[in-house]
Image (cartoon, coloured by chain):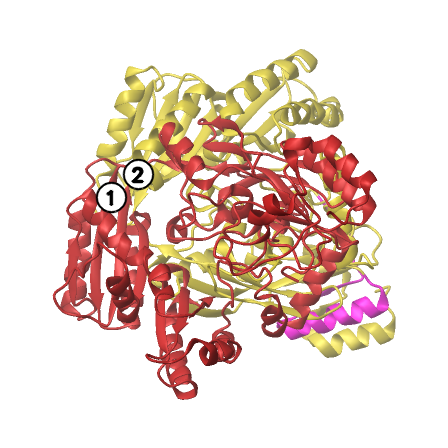
Chain colours: A yellow, B red
Amino acid sequence: MSGLSDDLLQALREVVGEAGLITDAERMQSYLSDWRGAYRGQAAAVLRPASTEEVAAVVRLCAQAGVALVPQGGNTGLCGGSIPDDSGAQIVLSLTRMKRIRAVDVGNETITVEAGVILQQLQETAAEVGRLFPLSLGAEGSCTVGGNLATNAGGTAVLRYGNMRDLALGLEVVMPDGRIWDGLRGLRKDNTGYDLKHLFIGSEGTLGIITAAVLKLFPAVRSLTTAWVALPSPQAAVELIGQMRSLCGDRLTGFELMSRQSVEFVLRHVTGVSDPFAEAHPWYVLIELSDTQPNAPLNEMLEQGLGTAFEQGVALDAVVAASDAQVRALWALREGISEAQNHEGPSLKHDISVPVSCIPDFIARTDQALQLAFPGVRIVAYGHVGDGNLHYNISKPVGAEDGPFKAQAEAIMRVIYDQVLEDAGSISAEHGLGQSKRLAAQHYKAPLELELMARVKQVLDPAGLMNPGKLL
Amino acid sequence: MSGLSDDLLQALREVVGEAGLITDAERMQSYLSDWRGAYRGQAAAVLRPASTEEVAAVVRLCAQAGVALVPQGGNTGLCGGSIPDDSGAQIVLSLTRMKRIRAVDVGNETITVEAGVILQQLQETAAEVGRLFPLSLGAEGSCTVGGNLATNAGGTAVLRYGNMRDLALGLEVVMPDGRIWDGLRGLRKDNTGYDLKHLFIGSEGTLGIITAAVLKLFPAVRSLTTAWVALPSPQAAVELIGQMRSLCGDRLTGFELMSRQSVEFVLRHVTGVSDPFAEAHPWYVLIELSDTQPNAPLNEMLEQGLGTAFEQGVALDAVVAASDAQVRALWALREGISEAQNHEGPSLKHDISVPVSCIPDFIARTDQALQLAFPGVRIVAYGHVGDGNLHYNISKPVGAEDGPFKAQAEAIMRVIYDQVLEDAGSISAEHGLGQSKRLAAQHYKAPLELELMARVKQVLDPAGLMNPGKLL
């Protein structure tokens, strides 16, 4: 049974209708844990409003009753940001029924969508009008635009197109008191005061509830080249991306780094993949060039860049995909890492960033510090070189037990984050803080920054009912 | 004589030294009015700190004494944002002595600069390491990075590279209480909480004083093509930019619209320019394509795009610059408009934006409404089509007196801004609010937005000593 008063329940039911109110324990389950099953909570109810006005009415009622709200999209986050606490007193506010494409303005190169639109549907809608919506990430088949905005999602196309923050022109937000901020403007220039949208983007639902957004569209890609390149070191990757970027400019739309360890896990556990090379190499990058022109000479450009790289010993071997199937096969090696690592026992995930130029030294230092403190741990390092973003994940030593390894999680994290701090990096590059990293952020962020964040939270959500226990 | 207490003056002198303190009325003059001479104020003193620590000490002393500060860079703003009020009680804090390039990190594609660095020097420093810093605007020879950040400067390269906001990765800010926020991180991904830098960028010095920034660099441009195209209408410009963008993608780095009236003023008043065409056309665009590749086939691409445009009647005539001198000559036609207009009497400037797709209807509606209300006024419309940004300036009717025309300024502004509001546009696309537009913003922005801005101001600068009378 719900812990909410009958009056409140009745009022909420009147707003969202029977279809929008779930209090049945069984039916609530899928809203109470994330897709990986890493986080689980309890809720007094799950609400599924179908419009901005319904969201606003729900927020108003909950504000009056002092009930906390946990906004939720596709529930694909990795830090527990959309999962309620254990009290059973919070309400999960699922935005998944708000999935209208409100407008496509080709002349303005924008699309206006509601928070519950699935990222993949957004990509497809853009493609239908000959445009690209570039945000691309593993969960794109189920994550929602609202979640992408609330967590400032990243992914593999950030190198060229930026994070979700960079793709948003305007927002519609329900404020903590239930008022609707209509900031749904499709403007590329607007200097009439503080840029409020940037407060809400990346705030993980702690300042208000994003219900819709105006997003940028880009010209469709008509030429594409994908290559898999073996490298001697992370330093080589940093040199190669510099050369390729200088040569190709914005045509360089993907540059993904993987350690041999990462690729080995994929080769071992993912079916249907194979090593593009006969011999093993210590590091690999997946390079993607694209162009709006059909038949653009991307292969020539790639060969030119790689030719120089071979001469300088920056690249050791390379293969260029000759078909769409080969493109998919190369990406499968990259995208299989996360899943493959799960087959090797618990995976301690660290989504960090440092300046691009610091990557080689960061990896060298951190590898050494970890092996010194936790001999034999297997380091699964991969990520987006151009963003300085590494998924620096750790698997247990061969033959070790899960329990003792998991008990070291906190200590391992500290070793890694301490090195991040030395490079003035970030302990959460693209995943956000959610539940899992908020305490670490309290430790690793500057006190003044934490104070400013707390003051902003205080002034926008003084009652603290917006996704409490997350981020801050 | 300064209105400051002897104790405060002495304390400030100890911080900034004799070289950093100006109280002499004569020597203060250049800090008390903007370069156009449109705004003039008084000040108790002008301070010129040479380091972040000095800025912090000054802010601390002024906070204790309750003295308001007006931060100032190159003093090239168009809205009076860096000019003190008439009270003589405020202190102008000039950042122009803080002009160190602190670091150039080619591997990270970033440059770290102090607030007083001149934009042109920043562009040149980038070029020296084979990179591009893309922000480009008329005042680049004297405007400073701090001012560019405080006003979120725009200009002609926004189409491809974004506003100043999009070019900044990290900031160093002296808070209103004198504490230093060290947010000087060169990270392309950092999701560890609210993005504080976006609060300060575009805040016109009302929330704190930006003392340094980490900015993005881009690959150098190695091929460039510039064309001058005659068009029948603004609608044709919107169609042409859509086609060119789809065809050329990121190679389209400039697309400037000018009415015949604008160009006529330049031809009449600027020496050394000439009409590229034998006959007059109603509208023109200046198109720039660029590429990181040397000898990129930009002319072929341009001809392809224009060929289609001629067939469809979207373009009427075109000339492609065949030399650097011709490139400069075409840009001179665009860049001469503002100065040329001054020769035709008072120029009422309106820096507005609407969605790109709304430009044609906006111009048609507003032209009509203006001619109905103020017959004979000459409309000098030009701007950045891809940004939806029009400089929709007004000159008096031929033969009219200055006085009565200037008396209509407010009424003319209302007609224009009312039309902006209809398209959910912005009354200040790139110039900011400063003194001149803050009251208009109070009228045209939504009450909730103004309230949120006021609450943010209140929580960060409760004493209201940071550039009072500006923006809010």
From this viewpoint, is residue A34 visible?
no
| Residue placed most toward the observer, B332 or A95 | B332
Task: Look at the image and say whether residue B444 sits in the magenta stretch.
Answer: no
Q: Position of residue B263 (x, y in %)?
A: 27, 65
Q: Quadrant of residue A334?
A: top left
Q: Quadrant of residue A380?
A: top right
Q: Is residue A279 above or below residue A208?
A: above
Q: Is residue A450 above or below residue A30?
A: above
What's the amino acid at mark 1? Answer: Leu
Q: Is residue B227 above or below residue B308?
A: above
SS assignment at label 1? strand
Real-space Cα separation, disc 2 to disc 1, in angstroms: 7 Å
Q: How many marks?
A: 2
Residue lying furthest left? B278
Q: Is residue A34 above or below residue A211?
A: above
The magenta region covers A39-67
Task: Look at the image and say whether residue A61 sits in the magenta stretch.
Answer: yes
Q: Is residue B315 left or right of residue B116?
A: left
| Residue placed most toward the observer, A155 or B189 | B189
Task: Give the residue at mark 1.
Answer: B224
Q: Which mark is residue B221?
A: 2
Query: In which chain is the residue bearing label 1?
Result: B
Disc 2 crowd rating (10 Å Cα; few below 14, some 14-19, many 20+) is some
Residues at circles 2 and 1 in contact by the CB criterion of under 8 Å: yes
Residue lying furthest bottom? B372
Q: Residue at x 73, y 44 (%)?
A: A435
Q: Residue at x 35, y 27 (%)?
A: A243
